[in-house]
Each structure stands twice: as structure tokens, then as C-alpha cells.
Image (cartoon, rainbow, N blue to C red):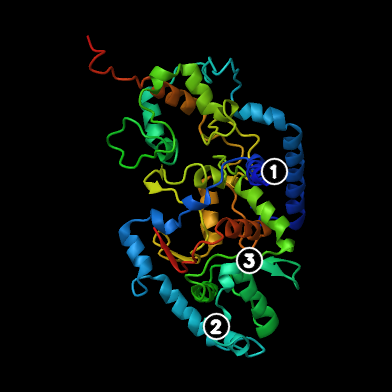
Amino acid sequence: MRMTGSRSRRLKSLARRWALAGLCLALAPCAHAAVLAPFEVAGDAIPQSLTGDKGDPARGRAIVVDRQKGLCLLCHSGPFAEQRFQGDIAPSLEGAGSRWSEGQLRLRLVDAPRLNRDTSMPSYYRIDGLNRVAPAFKGKPVLEAQQIEDVVAFLASLRETPTAQEKP
Amino acid sequence: MRAQWILPACVMLLAANSARAEIPLHERKSGAEFMSPQTQAMQADDVSNPGMLAALDGEAFWKQKAGAANKACADCHGPAEESMKGVSARYPAFNASASKPIDVQGQVNQCRSERQQAAPFRFESRELLALTTYIGLQSRGMPVSPPDDERLTLFRERGKALFNQRLGQLNFSCAHCHEDNWGRKLGSAPIPQAHANSYPIYRLEWQDVGSLQRRLRNCMTGVRAEAYSYGSPEFIELELFLAARARGMSVETPGVRP
């Protein structure tokens, strides 16, 4: 369309685009709010679901083991017998649901550096304060709100298996 | 008595200055040490090291006349075995005519333009990789020896800041992996310490020879950052810092990596 358009049409479209860019800049804080669901941090947790609903643990598991989506197993290991390559940079996800509440898991996924600024855990639900994000990922969180809830639901389901002595 | 306190005080000051623990000298390891014995053997044997083919090409280019000046590298520099010995071990160096630091590939292209009056080679072109591999080979076994040149200090410090800066959607710095977590596994791959003492390398993943800048761009893409352009000031600054960080380690060019 742009290729075949006349010179004046192209200029007009260019002007419109600049105007739009200006508008976007002016509305930047609102634009962020439109992309990310609002949430409240209480202590070391985000108690409320980002979507208002409970996530789906089966979908969450699929995200966790997906090396393009969740990327979790690059650094973590866990109870995933079928997954050959699991990292050991970060703690095992085994028993995560026994160690943390859903709200605590949610904040650790959404923005872990709030709890420890030196952590290597990425912020999965943050789009500001980042450097040189590649164009394909700019303005997008690593996971969407629904995906965060699915992963929270799955991680919360990972309970520590009782040891022999603890069994009745 | 007082002198006994000077060294510990200096060490403490240095430690307080840097945000994180740098790798102690005695724990430094070349990337080759993190590889399987098979890949190590491939690097160690010149007949099976695929990077040596690039070095052989480089030797041919060294002697080939080029440009309006119709000169070969060898016409000015003579045999590379003598004139290029130790050059890659000390580069990047400050280039007075450009008033900035320059790495070996930048130096090759400066010679192309100014001495040979030929078009500079493209980054990652077969010719540039061949020549830099051949030049690098002349330093093999020598210690990485960045020059003690005050004009480089500012650039090297900037490189250090870049190394420690978080980047991309995944928000990692180089140091997060290569200083805090070296030796651990990222997926299936052990994380090396990121010493730049073997470039250009033949990387099995690439099935080709590539420069340090290509490798750095790979990592940047991995953390979903917009990679710096080839030849950018940021890359030269990072190269300067990496050279200082690898000071004293043996040059292994051409390295083989998985």
C-alpha cells in the first residue's frame, strides 16, 4: 500500500504515524496499564489473581517445560521425568507449593528483583525499567496474565512428598 | 607494621568498589575446560580443528595483492610468523590515527583502506575471519597481554559497566551467568567464564568460524536484547574489558566450541 501510494499520501501517512507516536508517548503510563493488569503487592506476595480467576495447572505445566515460553528449565530442575535437559542455576521447583503460597509464587514470577535486586530470576510480568529489549519483545511481558496464573496454579500443586519417617 | 596493612586494605577497597565477586585468578578457566573430551581433542589437534582451515585461507590472503596500491599484507609486514607474533594477544589497542581503540579486525580493515586502498572486508566475511584467525594463530600459546595504555582506561571501564549491565526482556547481565553461575548448567550446557582467549572460534553450533562479536550477539539475542551492531563502540569496549579479565591466560586461537 505504502509502496504504491502517491508521494503526498505517503507524507500524510508519515505525519499521521508521527502524531500517533506522540500520542503514545503522552499516554505512555496509561498504555502500560492497558497492557499489564494492575496488581497490589502485600509483603512478599501478590495475594490476588492477575485475571481474577484461578489458573489451570495443566496449562501451567506446559508453559513451565516450554523452552520458548516459560524458559524455566533453562535454570531450574523439577519433577519432569520426560525433560532431558534441566538447568541447575536456580533451586529445584520440586515442592515449590509447599514452600510458598500462591501469592508468594505470583510475586516471585511477576517481579522477583523486588525481593532481591541481585537475583537472576527474570521479571515475567514487567515491561518497564528494562534495557535494550529486542524489537520483537518490546512492550510485552515474558508471560501474559493468564499464563502467569496457569504457572502459579501448577507450581502451587507441586507438593513435597513426605519422607518415609513422616508417613503414618 | 603499617606496611602489613596496606595490601589487605587495598584488597578491601577493590572488593568494595566492584558490585560482585570477580573470579579469583586461580579459579580462572578457559572455555575449553568446560567442553567434552571429544571437543577438547578436536581443538588440540591441528588436523581435526576446523578453524585451521580458516587459518590456511588467511595465510593465502596474507600473501595476496589487493587494492589500488596492489600490495599484500606481506609486502609491508613480511612473514606473519614474525611480525604478527603477539599482536592478537595485546589487541584491542589504542589507534592514534583513529583516536580510539581498535581491535584486530578493525586494524585489518584500516590497513585495507589506507595501505592497500581496497574496500574494507564485511564483518564475518570469509576473508576477514580467515585473516584474523591466521593473525590470531601467531599468538597461540602466548599470554593475553593487554597494553598498559592510559588512553584505554576509560573505554575498558565502560566495557566493565556493559558487562555488568542487565539487558533485554530477560534482564540478565553477562556477569549473572559468567561470574555468578559459571560451571553450572544452563539447560544442558555448562556455563563457561566468558574468557575471550580463543577467538575467532570454530563453533559447532554455527558449523563455521566466527568472531567474538558474533558470539556476544548470540548471548544478547538469548536474553532477548537488541544486539549491538558489528564494529560498534560497545563491542570494542567489551573486548577491552574481556582482554583485561583474561590477562595472562594462554591464547588458544583457533578455539573450537560446542
Q: How many other residues sit within 10 Å of disc 1, few (<14), some (14-19) or many (≥20)?
A: few
**Residue extending farthest top:** A168
CA–CA distance in space, label 1 to label 3: 39 Å
Indicate whether B112 appears above or below B156: below
* Dot 1 amino acid type: Arg
- At x 23%, y 12%, the residue is A167
Residue B209: tell me if it is visible: yes
Q: Chain of mark 3?
A: B
The residue lying toward the viewer, choosing from A99 and B251, is: B251
Horizontal side of B139 relative to B102 (left or right) equals left
- At x 63%, y 86%, the residue is B67
The residue lying toward the viewer, choosing from A37 and A44, is: A44
Indicate whether B227 appears above or below B170: below
- At x 70%, y 27%, the residue is A30
From the image, tell me which residue sits under label 2.
Answer: B82
Number of the front mark, 1 or 3: 1
Indicate whether B103 appears above or below A122: below
Residues marked 3 and 2 touching at CB (< 8 Å): no
Number of the front mark, 3 or 2: 2
From the image, tell me which residue sits under label 3.
Answer: B92
From the image, tell me which residue sits under label 1.
Answer: B2
Indicate whether B83 appears above or below A99: below
Q: Chain of mark 1?
A: B
Is the same chain shared between marks 3 and 2? Answer: yes
Number of the front mark, 2 or 1: 1
Q: Chain of mark 2?
A: B
CA–CA distance in space, label 3 to label 2: 19 Å
Q: Secondary structure at mark 2?
A: helix
- The mark nearer the N terminus, 1 or 3, is 1
- The mark nearer the N terminus, 2 or 1, is 1
